[in-house]
Image: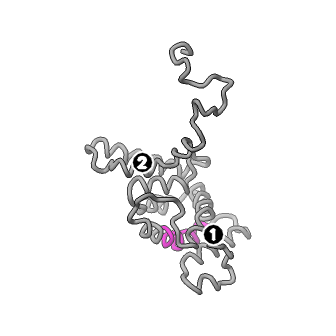
Amino acid sequence: MPVVFRGTTARADEVQCECHWGSAEELALLNEVGRSFSQGDWHRWPVRQSTAVEEFLHAWWAHSLTDPDPVVPVHELLGLCAEASGTISPWLTVWEALDHPVADRHLAEAADHWEHDLLGDELPWQTWGNDNADDMRTELTAWLVRHAPARLRTRNATAETEELLHRVRLMGLTGPARWEDPHWPNHHY
């Protein structure tokens, strides 16, 4: 095998070398998968191929929600799936319907990751030419405000959980009602 693939695969003593793994910039492009799917216009592919992509994304999403240690963190995977499909609704619907402690833990982690951006009225992932980014942000924010509190309260009640619940509540407020609330986290935007 080493003779056949000589020079194209890493040797055992080569760890994350640029010649085989790519540069930091090239590795960062792996985060562009959702956009690449979207730009590939896979919805217009022949039915068999587009169905395979859609089924793969849905299977990956459903599996990751209940995986204690998913390959891609759920808060990142939602962005990938939303960008790839051009919509956030079906992904949130699956998450909402899933009554599972691991899914709830992922929800707490996601809300914690997203709160700074959402409190600044920004989508918590970068979009590229996505005309409905504001709609996605609005839908994600409303979904979190509606569904996260009950799910987060079922977890162990800690001071951290209470603070996160306040930040989620603040997402549902606008203007001075948000900024003048005693639980406003004093983020600078």
Q: Which residue is mark 1?
A: 153
| 1 or 2: tag closer to the N-terminus | 2
For this view, does 35 lie left or right of residue 168? left
User: x, y (%) of residue 155?
Assistant: 65, 64
Q: Residue furthest top?
A: 3
For this view, does 78 lie left or right of residue 151? left
Secondary structure of the residue carrying tag 1 is: helix
Residue flagged by tag 1: what amino acid is it?
Answer: Arg
- Which portion, as a residue range, is magenta? 140-153
- Residue at the spot x=38%, y=52% of the render? 38
Tell me the chief SS of the magenta region.
helix
Depicted 116 relative to depicted 18: above or below: below
- Residue at the spot x=46%, y=71% of the render? 138
User: x, y (%) of residue 56?
Assistant: 41, 44
User: x, y (%) of residue 74?
Assistant: 55, 54
Q: Which residue is mark 2?
A: 36
Instruction: Kindly indicate the quadrant of the structure image that contains residue 20.
Output: top right
Give the position of the N terminus as an image quadrant: top right
Secondary structure of the residue carrying tag 2 is: helix
Residue flagged by tag 2: what amino acid is it?
Answer: Ser
**Between 46 and 163, which is closer to the camera in this rendering?**
46
User: x, y (%) of residue 175?
Assistant: 55, 84
**Between 31 and 93, which is closer to the camera in this rendering?**
31
Within 10 Å of disc 1 (Cα), the crowding (few <14, some 14-19, many 20+) is: some
Within 10 Å of disc 2 (Cα), the crowding (few <14, some 14-19, many 20+) is: some
